[in-house]
Structure formats: C-alpha cells, structure tokens
Image (cartoon, helix red, strand yellow):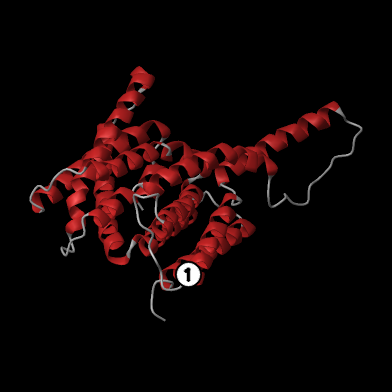
C-alpha cells in the first residue's frame, strides 16, 4: 500500500518523498536497535539495504511507464521468483538450499506465479492507451484530408494486444526485471546471517534491522543528492509533503519489520511469495477503483484472471511446505 502514495505524487516530488520516507526508516531502525540493546552492526545485512535503495530509484520511471498496479504486479512476480529461487536452491556457497515437503506443488506454484506476471504485461494502462488512441485519430484525419476520394475505413474494434503498447512497455519491463532482481535478493543477506549464526532467540532477526535500515537511508540520501545536482534549481522539495511522506515511511518500516519476522518464522520459500503477491493485488485494486487507470470490460477481465492465477500460485507455494 505504500506504493499507492508514491503513485499519487507527481514525477518531481517522488525523489523527495522517497528520501523523507527513508529518513523515517532510519529512525524506526534506531528505535529497534535501542530495544535490542545495540547489537553489532552487520555489514552483510547492510548489502540488503543497498539493494533496496538502488531498486527503489527505479520505481519512479516504472510507475510512470506501466502504472502502479501493473508495474507492482510484474515486479512482484519477478521478485517472488528471484527470492524463492535463492531460498529454494541456495546461492553458491553463501546460502544453503531450503527443502520443502512437496516439491511438485512448490514448482507448479512458482510456474503459475510466473505465468501470472507475464499476463500482467498485456493489461493496458489507461493513460497510455488514450495517448495511442489520440495519435491514431490524428493519423486518420490527415489521411482523409490528403486523399478525399478514398472511402473512410472504420475499425470495429481494437486488437486486444496492441503492438505499439508492447514496444512502449519493453524498456519499463526491463527496468522492472532489474528492480525485481535487486529487491528479490535484498533479504538474502539476512538469511545468510541467520544460517551462519543460528540462535534460539526468536527475535534475533531484529538485530539486523539497524544495519539494513541505516544503509537504506544512507544510499537513498546519495541518490537524492545526485538528483539535486542533476536537476539543480529544478529539484523539487515541498515541505507540505513531509508529513505524508513520513507516514509513508512509517508504513513501509512496519511492513518490512513484519517481513523480517515472517521470513524467519515461515522460511523465505513461503514468506516471499505471500509478502510480495498480496500487496501487489491490493495496489492493482486501488489502481482500478481509485485512480481508474485500468478500464474496459475485457481489460478488467484480463486483469482479474491474472490476479486469480497469481493467487492460486501463492496458495500452492504456501501449502507445499505443510503436512497435508
């Protein structure tokens, strides 16, 4: 749901909003650090913060190009694949693989989630569709003026899959894949630390939050400074956005803290699909009901089918590690 707030901001404000958000993340991380008795700073956990902050920069162009709902659903699907794969099969000699109780169900679930992510690419975002329609309309008028004798050609309906739309989305889909890899790997350093230092303390995972959160703030600050240097006097800072952005940061911090705990309790193989798919579905719903950037009966049916398929995949993954 924190991406809903980002989507509602203009392009110029999003870098500032993200920086304020990460400032709140730093404060929350420090409070947790105090509660945990100032545990040792873990540089391995800090790598996860770097991956998140770097991927976060790509959110702005992705949301602009694909829309919040579609963009979030695609990178959520890819992020699930990356996070699940690393947890399931391990990462070289750094992270040991995780076994599940039903391999077939686990694999089928991940294939279904991947198919769901591919389907979301073909869902048309309202703003871009309208531009395409307007452009086509202008072409038709010009052709009619230049060739009066030619009979007008009317299209009964537009093809469900527009090639121009797909070409437009390709660079944004590629950026989404990069974002998915970065965010899909951001919890891996935490998993590595938990395997290296097993503990009977069920809240031991919170000892790594300060390392993660402080690094998120540090690199977000670097990226924001780069934005200010590039934009110079055009860099946008609005004090009226501080409080909403702070709430945005508090919401993210709360969700991420619970993700730390759920990944520890359920294992990353199960937690990753759940924590990435469900928020994406909520964002797509908001995109339809509030921003209304996804319209049209066939388009909504396509979206509903993709969401339904994704939910089936998540359920299978969750059940694959249970005794049935």
Where is residue 180 shown, x and y percent of the image? 45, 46
Where is residue 247 shown, x and y percent of the image? 25, 47
Where is residue 141 shown, x and y percent of the image? 76, 33
Left or right side of 48 for 312: right
Query: In this figure, what is the number of numbered marks?
Result: 1
Residue found at x 21% / y 49%: 209
| Outermost bottom residue | 324
The kind of secondary structure element at disc 1 is helix
Mark 1 crowd level (few <14, some 14–19, many ≥20, 10 Å Cα): few
Where is residue 65 shown, x and y percent of the image? 52, 39
Left or right side of 246 for 59: right
Q: Badge 1 is on which residue? A: 103
Visible residue check, residue 24: no
Visible residue check, residue 226: yes
Of residues 108 and 153, the one nearer the viewer is 108
Left or right side of 214 for 280: right
Of residues 285 and 120, the one nearer the viewer is 120
Q: In the picture, which quadrant includes the C terminus?
A: bottom left
Of residues 275 and 88, the one nearer the viewer is 88
Residue found at x 38% / y 59%: 97
Residue found at x 78% / y 51%: 156
| Outermost front residue | 93
Left or right side of 306 for 151: right
Q: Locate residue 303: give its quadrant.
A: bottom right
Of residues 272 and 7, the one nearer the viewer is 272
| Outermost right residue | 149
């Amino acid at each position: 749901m924190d991406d809903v707030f980002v989507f509602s901001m203009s392009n110029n404000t999003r870098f500032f909003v993200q920086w304020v958000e990460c400032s709140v993340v730093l404060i929350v991380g420090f409070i947790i650090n105090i509660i945990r008795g100032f545990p040792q700073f873990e540089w391995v956990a800090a790598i996860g913060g770097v991956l998140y902050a770097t991927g976060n920069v790509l959110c702005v162009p992705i949301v602009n190009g694909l829309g919040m709902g579609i963009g979030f659903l695609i990178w959520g699907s890819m992020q699930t694949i990356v996070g699940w794969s690393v947890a399931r099969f391990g990462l070289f000699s750094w992270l040991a693989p995780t076994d599940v109780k039903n391999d077939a169900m686990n694999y089928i679930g991940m294939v279904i989630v991947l198919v769901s992510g591919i389907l979301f690419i073909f869902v048309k975002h309202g703003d871009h569709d309208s531009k395409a329609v307007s452009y086509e309309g202008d072409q038709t008028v010009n052709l009619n003026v230049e060739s009066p004798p030619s009979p007008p050609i009317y299209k009964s309906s537009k093809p469900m899959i527009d090639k121009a739309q797909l070409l437009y989305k390709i660079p944004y889909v590629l950026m989404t894949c990069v974002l998915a890899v970065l965010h899909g790997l951001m919890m891996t350093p935490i998993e590595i630390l938990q395997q290296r230092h097993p503990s009977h303390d069920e809240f031991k995972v919170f000892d790594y939050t300060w390392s993660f959160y402080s690094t998120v703030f540090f690199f977000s600050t670097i990226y924001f400074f780069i934005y200010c240097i590039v934009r110079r006097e055009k860099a946008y800072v609005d004090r009226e956005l501080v409080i909403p952005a702070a709430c945005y940061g508090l919401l993210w911090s709360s969700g991420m803290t619970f993700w730390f705990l759920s990944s520890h309790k359920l294992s990353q193989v199960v937690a990753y699909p759940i924590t990435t798919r469900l928020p994406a579905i909520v964002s797509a719903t908001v995109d339809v009901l509030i921003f209304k950037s996804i319209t049209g009966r066939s388009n909504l049916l396509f979206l509903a089918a993709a969401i339904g398929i994704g939910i089936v995949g998540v359920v299978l993954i969750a059940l694959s590690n249970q005794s049935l």
